[in-house]
C-alpha cells in the first residue's frame, strides 16, 4: 500500500449508533434553496434550460448583479413547520439542506460573511427554523456545504502562483471557520454533505479536507461526512490512492443509480444516491417543460432500487423564491407518502438481501430479521414470480403485506429455485410480498434430475 497521511481513516462500514441510524433512515429529502430560486432559470426574459442553480454562469451574470439578488430575498411564504409536516407525510427520515451553494449565499447569519440571510430583507436564520421544525417531526437534518464559492474573492479554481496560494489559504480558513460555526451552532445536525470539491485547488489541499473531517468529528462526535469532501495526499478523490473509500459513505451517485446486476460491489460500503425530479434541476426553475419530469412511480422505483442495494435515496425539492413548493413536487410527496404509509416497512431499516436481481422487481431485507420483502413492479403474465435463493436459504411462506392471511403458493422447483404464484390481474401500484424463510438444507422434495 502507498503510505498516506490524508487518505482513508478506516475501512469497512461504521457500526456506531449514529451511522446505524443514518443507514436505517434510507429515504431523505434534499432541499436546494438560495438566491437562484428568485430568477428560477429565467434572466432578462430569456429561459435557460441548464440547471437553474447555475443560472449565474449560464446567463453570464456579473457577480455584483447576481449578488444584489440578496436584497430581493424575502420568502414571505416560508413556513418551516409546514415543510417539515410535508416531509413527514412523504415518509422521509432525514433532510439535507443547502446551507451555502456555489453562489456563496448563506442561509444562516454567518459571522464570517455579510452575504447571508442577515443582509437580506428576510433577516432571520433559515437553518435554525428548519433544524427545529424537522427535528420536532423526528426527522434528522444534514447540512449540504459547497466548498466552491463564486462570491468569495479568495476562491481559486487552481493554484497557479504564490498569490493564488496566499489567497486560497485565506479561503480555506474562511470555509473551515464556517463549517466549525455550523457544527457548533446546530449541534443536532447529523451529517455534512460536501459538494464543489472537484477543482484542482481543492485536490491540491487534501490535508485541508482531512482536517475538516477531523474537526467536524471533534466538534460533533458521531457526525457523518460524505466521500465527496475528501482528497488524499495525491489529490485522489472519494477513494484514496490505495482504493480505500474516504469519508463515511460513498456519494458519487448523482442523478444515476448503480446497476442491480453489475454494480453489486456497492453493497460492501455505505452509499447514497441523490436525484432530481426533472432531468437536471436542483434549484427552482420556472419552466419544467424544458425536460422530462419523473413521475411519482418512477421515483418510487428508484427509492426501492436504492434500498435493495443497501443505499440511501435523497430526493431533491427546489422551493420557490417565496418559500413554497410547486404543484408537481407536492403531488410527488403525496403519492410517495401514501405508498410509504402502507409499505414503508420494506424501506426503513432495510438493506441488501444478498439475492440475485429478478425481472419482477427488488428484494429488501429487514435488518436482523428473517423477513424478506419482494417489491413487485413488473407483473409476469404467467403469475409466477421467480426466486433464486443463496445456498442454505429455504423459503417457508409468502403473502402480500396487506393480505397477510392469504398465503401464496410457494413451489420449490429446483435447488434454491422457487416460484411464487400471484393472481394475474392489473395492479395499479407496486405491491410488497413478505416472505418468511429459514437457514437450512433444501427440502429436496422436487424430482431430482434422472442421473
Ligand atoms: C456538472 O457539474 C456539476 C456541478 C455541480 C453540481 C451540483 N451537485 C448537485 C448535488 C447540485 O448541488 C448541483 O448544483 C452538479 C453538476
Image (tube, grey):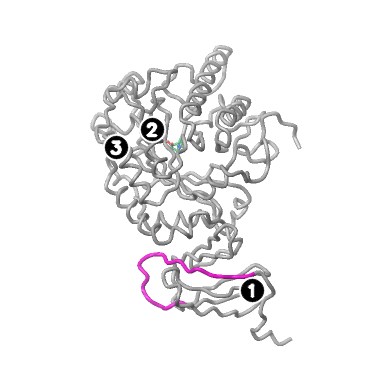
Q: Earlier in the sequence, mark 3 or mark 1?
A: 3
Residue at screen point 60% across, 64% down: 355
Q: What percent of the width, then of the height, locates residue 25?
A: 49, 49
Residues marked 3 and 2 touching at CB (< 8 Å): no
Q: How many marks are shown on the rendered structure?
A: 3
Q: Secondary structure at mark 1?
A: loop
The response on whether ligand 1 sits within 8 Å of label 1 is no
The response on whether ligand 1 sits within 8 Å of label 2 is yes
Figure quarter occupied by ligand 1: top left
Q: Earlier in the sequence, mark 3 or mark 2?
A: 2
Nearer the camera: disc 3 or disc 1: 3
Which residue is at the front of the view, 76 or 288?
76
Nearer the camera: disc 3 or disc 2: 3
As drawn, 365 above or below 192: below
Q: State the quadrant of the N terminus.
A: top right
Q: Is residue 423 magenta?
A: yes
Decide: few, some or many residues near mark 2? Use Cα within 10 Å; few <14, some 14-19, many ≥20: some
Boundaries of the magenta span: 422-438
Q: What percent of the width, then of the height, locates residue 293?
A: 34, 50
Residue at screen point 42% across, 29% down: 100
The response on whether ligand 1 sits within 8 Å of label 3 is no
Decide: few, some or many residues near mark 3? Use Cα within 10 Å; few <14, some 14-19, many ≥20: some
Which residue is at the front of the view, 214 or 70?
214
Checking the image for residue 79, the label placed there is 3
Which residue is at the front of the view, 136 or 84?
136
- Residue identifier under label 1: 416
Decide: few, some or many residues near mark 1? Use Cα within 10 Å; few <14, some 14-19, many ≥20: some
Horizontal arrangement in the rendering, residue 185 relative to residue 337 (left or right)? right
Q: Earlier in the sequence, mark 2 or mark 1?
A: 2
Checking the image for residue 54, the label placed there is 2
Horizontal arrangement in the rendering, residue 157 relative to residue 102 (left or right)? right
Amino acid at each position: 500500500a502507498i503510505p498516506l497521511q490524508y487518505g482513508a481513516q478506516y475501512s469497512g462500514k461504521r457500526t456506531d449508533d449514529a451511522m446505524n441510524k443514518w443507514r436505517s433512515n434510507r429515504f431523505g429529502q434534499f432541499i436546494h434553496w438560495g438566491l437562484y430560486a428568485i430568477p428560477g432559470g429565467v434572466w432578462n426574459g430569456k429561459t435557460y434550460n441548464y440547471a437553474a442553480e447555475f443560472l449565474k454562469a449560464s446567463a453570464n451574470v456579473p457577480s455584483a448583479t447576481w449578488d444584489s439578488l440578496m436584497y430581493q430575498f424575502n420568502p414571505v411564504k416560508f413556513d418551516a413547520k409546514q415543510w417539515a409536516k410535508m416531509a413527514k407525510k412523504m415518509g422521509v427520515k432525514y433532510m439535507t439542506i443547502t446551507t451555502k451553494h456555489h453562489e456563496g449565499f448563506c442561509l444562516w447569519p454567518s459571522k464570517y460573511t455579510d452575504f447571508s440571510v442577515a443582509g437580506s430583507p428576510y433577516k432571520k436564520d433559515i437553518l435554525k427554523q428548519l433544524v427545529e421544525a424537522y427535528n420536532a417531526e423526528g426527522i434528522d437534518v444534514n447540512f449540504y456545504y459547497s466548498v466552491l464559492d463564486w462570491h468569495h474573492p479568495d476562491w481559486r479554481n487552481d493554484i497557479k502562483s504564490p498569490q493564488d496560494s496566499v489567497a486560497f489559504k485565506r479561503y480555506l480558513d474562511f470555509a473551515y471557520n464556517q463549517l466549525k460555526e455550523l457544527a457548533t451552532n446546530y449541534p443536532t445536525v447529523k451529517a455534512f454533505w460536501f459538494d464543489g470539491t472537484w477543482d484542482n485547488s481543492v485536490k491540491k489541499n487534501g490535508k485541508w479536507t482531512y482536517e475538516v473531517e477531523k474537526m467536524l468529528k471533534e466538534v460533533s462526535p458521531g457526525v457523518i461526512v460524505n466521500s465527496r469532501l475528501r482528497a488524499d495526499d495525491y489529490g485522489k478523490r472519494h477513494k484514496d490512492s490505495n482504493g480505500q473509500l474516504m469519508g463515511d459513505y460513498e456519494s458519487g451517485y448523482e442523478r444515476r443509480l448503480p446497476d442491480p446486476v453489475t454494480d453489486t460491489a456497492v453493497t460492501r460500503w455505505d452509499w447514497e444516491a441523490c436525484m432530481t425530479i426533472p432531468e437536471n434541476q436542483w434549484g427552482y426553475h420556472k419552466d419544467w417543460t424544458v425536460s422530462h419530469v419523473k413521475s411519482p412511480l418512477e421515483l418510487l422505483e428508484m427509492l426501492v432500487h436504492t434500498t435493495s442495494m443497501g443505499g440511501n435515496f435523497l430526493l431533491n425539492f427546489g422551493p420557490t423564491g417565496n418559500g413554497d413548493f410547486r404543484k408537481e413536487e407536492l403531488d410527488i410527496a403525496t403519492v410517495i407518502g401514501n405508498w410509504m404509509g402502507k409499505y414503508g416497512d420494506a424501506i426503513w431499516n432495510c438493506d441488501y438481501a444478498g439475492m440475485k436481481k429478478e425481472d419482477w422487481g427488488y428484494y429488501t431485507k429487514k435488518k436482523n430479521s428473517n423477513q424478506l420483502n419482494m417489491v413487485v413492479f413488473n407483473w409476469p403474465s404467467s403469475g409466477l414470480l421467480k426466486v433464486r435463493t443463496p445456498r442454505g436459504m429455504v423459503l417457508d411462506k409468502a403473502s402480500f403485506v396487506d393480505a397477510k392471511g392469504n398465503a401464496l403458493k410457494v413451489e420449490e422447483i429446483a435447488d434454491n429455485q422457487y416460484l411464487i404464484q400471484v393472481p394475474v390481474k392489473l395492479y395499479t401500484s407496486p405491491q410488497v410480498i413478505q416472505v418468511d424463510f429459514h437457514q437450512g438444507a433444501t427440502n429436496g422434495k422436487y424430482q431430482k434430475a434422472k442421473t
